[in-house]
Image (cartoon, helix red, strand yellow):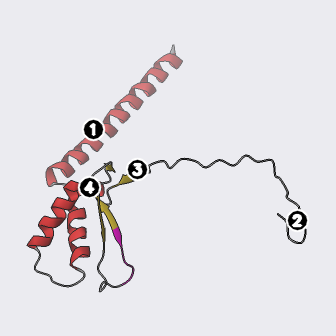
Amino acid sequence: MTQGNNVTVETGQVTRRRGYWYKLSRCSICLRLLWLRLVMLSEPVGVPEPLRHWILCQHCYQALLGELSRSSIRSPLRLRIAIGLVAAERSPAAYSAPARPKTSEQEAFQKEFAVFTWLMILFALMHMVIFAIIFTVR
């Protein structure tokens, strides 16, 4: 209804209520899809802002409980620290390949390979020059 007069205005749109579709959640640590058995955690009141919330799978939750039982810290930050330790072990980002320093054998091989490659290139160029001279003399 519009204001002021008692006239109903139709827009011609059909309105339907859509059924609720279950939104899949992922574990906050290991990023697995969670179906039925998920654990929702939020930080206690004494933790500095921002308060964080996590959804965990059962495997990460069990690892978190193990880390909490092992911890000697009794402050409100205990949960955040334990989540960080579990995430450092179980997160997919934790498995990125670290940059390993090269050994002296690897460095020596790289130098020898570079010298060998340049010698092969010079050998091929030398032969091309010789063939060009032979074809021009004939």
Q: Nearer the N terminus, badge 4 or badge 1?
A: 4
Q: CA distance from mark 4 to mark 3?
A: 12 Å
| Closer to the camera in the image, 120 or 104 | 104
Q: CA distance from mark 4 to mark 1?
A: 54 Å
On screen, residue 40 above or below 31:
below
Closer to us: mark 3 or mark 1?
A: 3
Q: Which quadrant of the rendered structure holds the N terminus? A: bottom right
- Residue at 50% from the left image edge and 17% from the top image edge: 135
Q: CA distance from mark 2 to mark 1?
A: 93 Å
Q: CA distance from mark 4 to mark 2?
A: 56 Å
Q: Residue type at mark 4?
A: Cys
Q: Determine whether, in the image, residue 103 is placed left or right of residue 49.
A: left
Residue 2 position by quadrant: bottom right
Q: Residue type at mark 2?
A: Asn
Q: Is residue 44 visible?
A: yes
On screen, residue 30 above or below 64:
above
- CB atoms of marks 2 and 3 within 8 Å: no
- As drawn, the residue found furthest toward the top would be 138
Label ID, residue 100 = none
Closer to us: mark 2 or mark 1?
A: 2
Residue 100 position by quadrant: bottom left
Q: Nearer the N terminus, badge 4 or badge 3?
A: 3
Label ID, residue 6 = 2
On screen, residue 44 above or below 106:
below
Stretch in magenta: 49-53
Residue, disc 4: 57
- Residue at 14% from the left image edge and 68% from the top image edge: 67
Residue, disc 3: 24
Residue, disc 1: 116
Q: Nearer the N terminus, badge 2 or badge 1?
A: 2
